Amino acid sequence: MSQVTREHFDQDMVPCYAPMAMVPVRGEGCTLWDQAGHAYLDLAGGIAVNCLGHCHPVLVDAIAQQSQRLWHVSNIMTNEPALALAGKLKAHSFADRVFFCNSGAEANEAAFKLARRAAVNLYGPEKSEIIAFKQGFHGRTFFTVSVGGQACYSDGFGPKPQEIRHLPYNDLAAVSAAMSSRTCAVVVELIQGEGGVIPVDLNFLKGLRELCDRHNALLIVDEVQTGVGRTGHFYAYQATGVIPDILTSAKSLGGGFPIAAMLTTESCAKHFTPGTHGSTYGGNPLACAVANAVVDVVSEPSFLAKVQLSGAALVQALNQLNEQYHLFQTVRGQGLLVGAELNQQWQGRAGEIMAAAAQQGLLMLVAGKNVLRFTPPLIITPAEIEQAIGKLARAITELQEKAIA
Ligand SMILES: *Cc1c(COP(=O)(O)O)cnc(C)c1O
């Protein structure tokens, strides 16, 4: 394997990604090492996935144990890890019923299909409209990307799934005006992750719940990015007082092993009768064994409390950096999903800053051209946060010196 290099990507892979120049080969905690042995402090965390960092001993142990017992049986049989995990997710949420699949997109696909099916069964085929929000992101299958609010991702693939409406995020009047008896569901992120780390307005969310109740529509919260401890709550909705009808969970749920879940109520779940929906791999024992271990660690109140403290420390460190370098107009987010929006002077340069940071051994993300996004492992320490900000400061200094030269 040591003979492969980054050049092979350009020769062999479908070019739908533009990966970094370095190729990571090993990870531990919040650190990654590349082929040349360079270390990187990882505040991207596999895009909000590696919630316990890289190769966490509890997860290594869970996968090792289960790998010697049972990997996959398909859904013609159930299995112990899946049933145990379903019980835990129910215990840590509003849900009565759980459907397992393998990615965030699949969980949302299941959610949208379930909402449509329930509406058809209860009210007839006219009730099929899904309301979603601009800049929202729900995955890359054709249905989910069409529900997502960025036309640039969904255009150019021929006719789209119909009856999807995109409204401005946090604009309750717009939803109130648009909703009708034909609306079967409203889908919302509690923090728009890909869309710029934009938190939902609490009154907006409460208003959506009321409008859904009034119009017999389902409220779907996409917690693929915010779920499983990311915000310092097990699920972000738990800090809002608003209970959804359907919740989708992925990313952190497997800590790096692919697994996703759709959580729902008894009354919704009953519309997915045998044969209406499915997945070959969904709920396989190997993935569920890892997720069981993730949930056991992350659901501990002391663990969640620490995520809140670490998030506050990261925001504070970014604000301090800002006092010195005047980069951001706002630093926002919740727990360890943090966005820093660039000010006028740095407009459009998020990608450039990310690249300069990587040169300094710091990995992070962007959300569009103007927002730096941080989704570190939830186990990140205060010392690592301090190191990361130091590296970011050096990256900014480099960019400033380059501009002068
Ligand atoms: C990442 C993400 C998805 C898509 O998840 P995949 O596992 O890439 O399919 C869906 N919704 C939100 C909010 C996400 O952040």
Image (cartoon, rainbow, N blue to C red):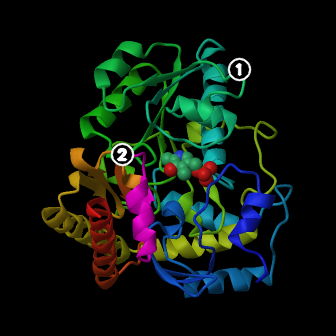
Please report the bounds of the magenta region as a residue range.
Answer: 351-369
Q: Position of residue 158 (x, y in %)?
A: 72, 23
Q: Position of residue 283 (x, y in %)?
A: 72, 60
Other-residue count near label 2 (Cα within 10 Å), few / some / many at <14 / 14–19 / ≥20: some
Q: Position of residue 403 (x, y in %)?
A: 29, 59
Residue at (39, 20) in percent of width and height: 214
The reply to whether residue 28 is in sight is yes
Q: Quadrant location of the N terminus? A: bottom right
Residue at (41, 66) in percent of width and height: 356
Left or right, 194 with respect to 11, comes to left
Nearest to N terminus: mark 1 or mark 2: 1
Numbered disc 1: secondary structure:
loop
Which of 372/100 is in front? 372
Other-residue count near label 1 (Cα within 10 Å), few / some / many at <14 / 14–19 / ≥20: few
Which of 8/32 is in front? 8
Q: Amino acid at mark 1?
A: Pro
Residue 281 — which label? Answer: none
Numbered disc 2: secondary structure:
loop
Per the image, the residue denoted by label 2 is 348
Q: Amino acid at mark 2?
A: Gly
Q: Quadrant location of the C terminus? A: bottom left
Q: Quadrant of residue 257?
A: bottom right
Q: Does mark 2's beta carbon lie closer than 8 Å to ligand 1? A: no
Left or right, 236 with respect to 145, comes to left
Identify the residue at the far left of this view.
323
Q: Quadrant of residue 309?
A: bottom left
Per the image, the residue denoted by label 1 is 159
